Image (cartoon, grey):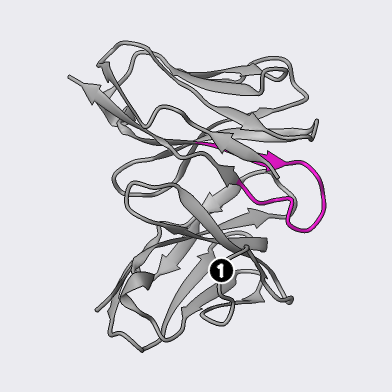
């Protein structure tokens, strides 16, 4: 149990367009979901925390108008990269908490390439 | 704010040998969790082991064990009988046990790339 999926696994988009990444908890209800960004050979950088039905909490330095996060249900959170630019190219990972458990369950990640 | 530091960017070990990865952290809290995560080339994050700060006993999971020194704020991971499948990036992470908004987030170290030599 406790499986988190992400879709798509890999996306290429043109500069100036928007792209949406979905994160789903498949067999549990996720009260909290997290979005991370990871550059090659670097650690995970937390972008934002989202709770179902409320606005996401963004980390300092993350542009909330550029990275739109919606947590519409207890099993789905989406990250939309608006007006994408090549510097937004990265690996994006989501994770989810079940109830108030300690463990975060990670999705497999999405590789975004902006051309 | 809490910080996690991994001072070894890369480590290598011979297959079947033992290796220890280091991690130190800084916090003013007394109750928290510490984790080691593994990220293989697939980039899927895998939980290796966790430690609750209130527990004095070091956590173990098969070939993986930790040396948790709360006063020194040190949390090292020992991998025994290293196997080729252990090759990966390893991240140390901290999580508060406070039940308030924002406290559930993980704070990661920089990572250590572990290579297993056959």
Q: Residue furthest front?
A: A61
Q: Position of residue A67 (x, y in %)?
A: 52, 76
Quarter assignment of residue B53:
top right
| Magenta-tinted stretch | B92-106
Q: Position of residue B107 (x, y in %)?
A: 60, 45
Q: Chain of mark 1?
A: A
> Can residue B62 be seen in the rendering of this structure?
no
- The relative height of residue B64 versus residue A100 in the rendered view (above or below) is above
x 46%, y 57%: residue: A107
Q: Which residue is mark 1?
A: A62
Q: Is residue B104 left or right of residue A6?
A: right
Q: Nearer the viewer, residue B74 or A4?
A: B74
Q: Is residue A91 magenta?
A: no
Residue that appears at 27% across and 27% down: B115
Observer-nearest of A48 and A70:
A48
Residue B23: x and y in percent read 53, 27
Residue furthest top in the image: B17
Spot occupied by residue A58 in the image (x, y as percentages of width and height)? 64, 67
Horizontal side, residue A46 vs residue B39: left or right: right
Secondary structure of the residue carrying numbered label 1: loop
Residue B94 falls inside the magenta stretch: yes
């Amino acid at each position: 149990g406790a499986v988190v999926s992400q879709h798509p696994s890999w996306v290429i988009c043109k500069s100036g367009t928007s792209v949406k990444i979905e994160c789903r908890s498949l067999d549990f209800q996720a009260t909290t979901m997290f979005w991370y960004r990871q550059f090659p050979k670097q650690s995970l950088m937390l972008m934002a925390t989202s709770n179902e039905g409320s606005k996401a909490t963004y980390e300092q330095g993350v542009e909330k108008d550029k990275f739109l996060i919606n947590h519409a249900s207890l099993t789905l959170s989406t990250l939309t990269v608006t007006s994408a630019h090549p510097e937004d190219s990265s690996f994006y990972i989501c994770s989810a908490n079940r109830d108030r458990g300690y463990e975060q369950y990670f999705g497999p990640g999405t590789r975004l390439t902006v051309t | 704010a809490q910080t996690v530091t991994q001072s070894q960017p890369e480590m290598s070990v011979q297959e079947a040998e033992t290796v220890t990865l280091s991690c130190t952290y800084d916090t003013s809290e007394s109750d928290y969790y510490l984790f080691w995560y593994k990220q293989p080339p697939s980039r899927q994050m895998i939980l290796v082991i966790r430690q609750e700060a209130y527990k004095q006993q070091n956590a173990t999971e098969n070939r993986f064990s930790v040396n948790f020194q709360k006063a020194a704020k040190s949390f090292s991971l020992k991998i025994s009988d290293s196997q080729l499948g252990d090759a990966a990036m390893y991240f140390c992470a901290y999580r508060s046990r406070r039940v308030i908004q924002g406290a559930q987030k993980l704070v990661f170290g920089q990572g250590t790339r572990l290579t297993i030599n056959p």
